[in-house]
Amino acid sequence: MAQSTIDMSNHHIQASGKAENELWMTIQEEASDCVSHEILLSKHLNFFVLAHPSLKHALAFSLAMKLASAALDSDALYNIFMESMQSSTEIVDGVCADLRAVKERDPVCSTFCHCLLNFKGFQACQVHRIAHYLWNHGKKTLACVLQSRSSEVFGVDIHPAARIGKGILLDHAAGVIIGETAVVGDNVAILHGVTLGGTGKQGGDRHPKIGSGVLIGARASIIGNITVGEDAKIGAGALVLTEVPPRTTAVGRPARLVGGRINPTIHKEPPIETMDHLAYVSDWCHYVI
């Protein structure tokens, strides 16, 4: 390996560690502040946050406790999660980016600590990151077991082969389904009940490709190997069966582009900045209220 490549790798590891440490210090401060105001939560926050030396340790512990069962030992799960995160800066980068995304875009997220401990969309996404790492390192059966347990516990079913970027917000998350060959870019917001699915029983590349900056509204379904372009918006309840160009809005069942496919309306503001997944629906449906 060339020296410049080694230097770049070391620089990335150092930057990743610095970002994690800064977030962890903030989370510990938030937990300590909460303890000072809510004595009832003292044991809980010490157990899940304050007793741990790093964000990785706290996350591994929290996920292991949630996914453990009579057949899955929490200590064994903890070790698997720690080994995966210690081996992959990509997982840790995703964790940190997701924490920031939830805090910035979800108005009910008051602290990073609140997200870490209580947001099942965030937690399910981190289980997927670990399962995806295991899938790519020859541990496909274990990855599928984690997928199954995550689906049972969090109500989120993401195939471990699916590729998901950083800065992901799974808002409420209940009922989210993401198929095997799906690809989700960076800074994507997905609300509850969303399906990124295939069709038929054919194998191969059969799931959607979601560009960066996309907002997918509640209970939308995007089916087949189609592309949703960067910064596009999928309205709540939409059924998307064809390509959606960048910075356009698709609404309806089946979905059509606002403004028409020949000359669709182009929105200037990235939808994840507003998190508005109902805009243009009334224009398209022409309902009289």
Image (cartoon, rainbow, N blue to C red):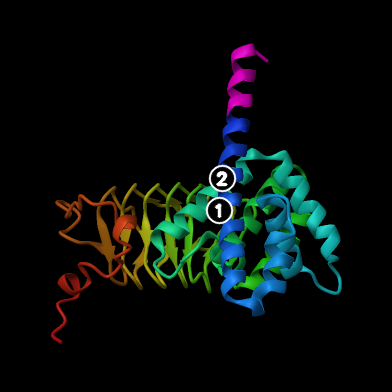
Seen from the viewer's position, the closer of residues 8 and 196 is 8
Magenta region, main secondary structure? helix
Image quarter in which the N terminus is found: top right
Q: Mark 1: which secondary structure? A: helix
Magenta range: 1-11
Q: Position of residue 65 (x, y in %)?
A: 75, 68
Note whether 220 is above or below 51 in the view shown: below
Q: Is residue 48 magenta?
A: no
Q: CA distance from mark 2 to mark 1?
A: 6 Å
Q: Nearer the viewer, residue 174 or 85?
A: 85
Residue 68, relative to residue 257: is it above or below?
below
- Please name whichever residue, 226 or 88, is drawn nearer the observer in this view of the structure: 88
Percent across and percent down for residue 75 are: 85, 61
Q: Amino acid at mark 1?
A: Thr
Task: Tell me if label 2 and label 1 are in contact, CB under 8 Å.
Answer: yes
- The residue carrying mark 2 is 22
The quarter of the displayed image where residue 4 is located: top right
Q: Is residue 4 magenta?
A: yes
Callout 2 crowding tier (Cα within 10 Å): few <14, some 14–19, many ≥20: few
Q: Residue at x 81, y 73 (%)?
A: 69
Q: Which residue is mark 1?
A: 26
Residue 201 visible in the picture: no
Amino acid type assigned to the residue bearing label 2 in the image: Glu
Q: Left or right: where does residue 18 sit relative to residue 109?
A: right
